[in-house]
Amino acid sequence: MPVALFALTAGAFGIGVTEFVIMGLLLEVSQDLGVSVPAAGLLISGYALGVVLGAPLLTLSTRRWPRKTVLMSLMAIFTIGNAACALADSYAMLMAARILTALAHGTFFGVGSVVATTLVPPERKASAIAVMFTGLTVANILGVPAGTWLGQAYGWRASFWAVTAVGLLALAVLGAFVARDSAADTGSSVMDELRALRRRPVLLGLLTTVLGFGGVFTVFTYIAPILTRITGFADSAVSPVLLVFGGGLIIGNLVGGKLADRRLVPTVIGTLVVLALVLLTMTWALPHKAWAVLHVALLGLTAFATVPPLQMWVLQKVDGAGESLASSFNIAAFNLGNALGAWLGGVVVDHGPGLASVTWAAAILPGIAVLVALASIRLEDGGRRSEKRPANCPSNESLTA
């Protein structure tokens, strides 16, 4: 893999840390700024909203720029946003700074995914996307725990100053190793790109992403109370178990990329099916500590095994026009899946069968995602058959009539 690809990985690492580190600092933030813990938790929702809004807006507004310029500008926004978080003296200012930082997220991963695929031969495109997303998985297993420790030891602002430093380093690495002649999207109009995005296979691909990843966060949002109240782990054991989850993320991400390079469509369907099965069987595994730890590892593995195939699948569906826009929208779709999963898990816990039923409820979402993916495949196959039919050959419907 070329060095430029690892420059993208460095940027992905920094963005991953800033997205998730706040989860471990909610108590410190709430006490320092004088807000409730649920209000501090809205800083996570605000970030997700910034990702969803920023992905299409920044991708469209920078579509004529060279991609290296886009990536460096986004990393500059990310760095400034984290410095603003560290300097925030009120809850409103911190929320605004979080949203500013999040604006860069979707477009960085969207444009970065497209750049990653141009750095390698065609048969390694999904693996290139996986290498870039490794930065996000390493952020979960190493960056977030380190940032949480730093914030608890020296104050939550220290964590954001550290991430600001990571942003400066990533900016330098991107400037040094990403080629200056990375192509800009100049061959199509905004309307062409929007029309490509509105095609039914593309929309079904985005819906598949939302549903597939929604199942992951239905469980992961409530993983700490699940492990303590159902499995019986002590609070101090949750972090080591989550390290197992992080290890699964890294392995699953790389394996998913390699499988997608070989056979993309079977990998999309297969990883979603396996994810649904892991979530379903987790229901019976949780009361037993050894089996619970195994399933946490499998959840991490199957969760990110879906990411490179889903990202590559959506990229293929746009067929050139609007690649960066579709890629950014798919990143937004992952974040919508996060929000959907957290909402569904909350409904099950507060108004449904309870915490013990979160896992089997979560399995429903990737199960539906498989049906949506199959419908998309059938639709595309039907479209290809229609294109191949000679103009003077009557359709089945006309013959029946």
Image (spheres, rainbow, N blue to C red):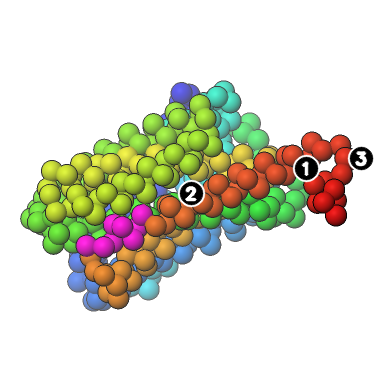
Q: Nearer the viewer, mark 3 or mark 2?
A: 3
The answer to which of 257 and 184 lies nearer the viewer is: 257
Residue beneath disc 3: 392
Identify the residue at image location x=60%, y=48%. Answer: 376
Q: Is residue 18 left or right of residue 392?
A: left
Q: Amino acid at mark 3?
A: Asn
Residue 143 at what x, y percent from top left?
A: 27, 44
Q: Secondary structure at mark 3?
A: loop
Q: Amino acid at mark 2?
A: Val
Residue beneath disc 2: 370
Task: Report, in whole angstroms, how far the alpha carbon at label 1 lies from the one at label 2.
Answer: 24 Å
Residue 106 visible, this orientation: no
Instruction: Give the magenta part as a residue range.
Output: 356-363
Q: Secondary structure at mark 2?
A: helix
Task: Report, in whole angstroms, how far the alpha carbon at label 3 lies from the one at label 2.
Answer: 36 Å
Q: Residues within 10 Å of mark 2 (few under 14, many from 20)?
A: many
Q: Residues within 10 Å of mark 3 (few under 14, many from 20)?
A: few
Q: How many marks?
A: 3
Residues tagged 1 and 3 counted as in contact (Cβ below 8 A): no
Identify the residue at image location x=37%, y=73%. Answer: 92
The answer to which of 98 and 226 lies nearer the viewer is: 226
Identify the residue at image location x=74%, y=39%. Answer: 385
Residue beneath disc 1: 386
Residue 79 at what x, y percent from top left?
A: 41, 51
The answer to which of 61 and 51 lies nearer the viewer is: 51
Instruction: State whether residue 236 is above or below residue 168.
Output: below
Residue 83 at what x, y percent from top left?
A: 37, 56
Q: Is residue 73 left or right of residue 159?
A: right
Q: Is residue 241 left or right of residue 382?
A: left
Residue 16 at what x, y percent from top left?
A: 36, 48
Task: Report, in whole angstroms, how far the alpha carbon at label 1 lies from the one at label 3.
Answer: 12 Å
Q: Earlier in the sequence, mark 3 or mark 2?
A: 2
